[in-house]
Image (cartoon, rainbow, N blue to C red):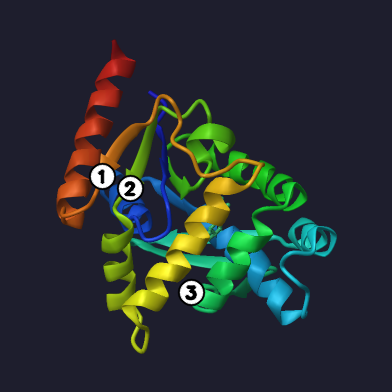
Amino acid sequence: MRELTIAIDGPASSGKGTVARRVAESLGYAYVDTGAMYRAVGLHALRAAVDPTDALATTRIAEALRFGFDWHKGKLRVLSDREDVTTAIRNEWVGSAASAVAVHPGVRSALLQTQRDLGAGGGVVMDGRDIGTVVLPEADLKIFLDASLEERARRRHAELPGSTYEGVRDELEARDAQDSGRLTAPLRRADDAVHLDTTGRTIDEVVEEVLRLVAAARKERER
Ligand code: DC
């Protein structure tokens, strides 16, 4: 039987990256972090002093980049043009730039085919904002992970030494507004996605619940 395709969407700091990674590892599936692709485009724009709101210039960057994912023993290495950008893309400046470049339809369509190809064979957990709605609308299981703004801000603040809670919360709120308010492929729960609110729940509990949903989806397919 073909292995499942699992789509996990949700806002920043909802826990989707950690949950997706853990679920993929536990199932022996590949993990694809589509946010990392937008982050790589944002990183290259910042380095080239290109304004992330410049649709044409950022689309050219997205079209030219070649991505690679190296998923091994629960760790994901992200490559763009063969450079390992795993660490360089993990900061707030790149996160904001990623959210800004992700507004442009040209940038999104430049990344779409690569994302679909990565999901095509099954046996994959892919996370992002539009996986269940646009990238893999036929996914076998769709999860929408969410948590309150305050809880997400607390989690992010704890991970960022030197940050203030209010600063982190305001940045998250702005990113939510930009990701949900854009015209092309906004952050939105697919009609057939399972909504999981992670507020007040541990990662272990959420991973267990997703694995139960995976088992149920498998049974459903066997019928
Ligand atoms: O998941 P993340 O925080 O690493 O994503 C960074 C930004 O990339 C996010 O603010 C919006 C954009 N993004 C997107 O528009 N669509 C996706 N499928 C994934 C990320």
Cα separation, mark 1 vs mark 2, equals 5 Å
Residue, x 40% and y 24% (percent of image)?
192
Dot 3 or dot 2, earlier in sequence: 3
What x and y, as percent, mark residue 85? 57, 74
**Foreground pick, 208 / 198:** 198
**Foreground pick, 26 / 47:** 47
- Label 2 sits on what residue type? Asp
Label 3: which secondary element: loop
Q: Quadrant of residue 66?
A: bottom right
Check disc 3 and report the residue beneath it. 90
- Label 3 sits on what residue type? Arg
**Foreground pick, 173 / 54:** 173
- Label 1 sits on what residue type? Asp
What x and y, as percent, mark residue 137? 53, 29
User: Nearer the viewer's eye, disc 3 or disc 2?
Assistant: 2
Check disc 1 and report the residue beneath it. 197
Label 1: which secondary element: strand
Q: Tell me the crowding category of disc 3: few under 14, some 14 to 19, or many 20 or more residues within 10 angstroms, Cα based.
A: some
Check disc 2 and report the residue beneath it. 146
Residue, x 84% and y 59% (percent of image)?
56
* Number of numbered markers: 3
Left or right: residue 40 compared with residue 154: right
Q: Quadrant of residue 184?
A: top right
What x and y, as percent, mark residue 82? 66, 70
Label 2: which secondary element: strand
Quadrant of the image for the C terminus? top left
What x and y, as percent, mark residue 49? 77, 80
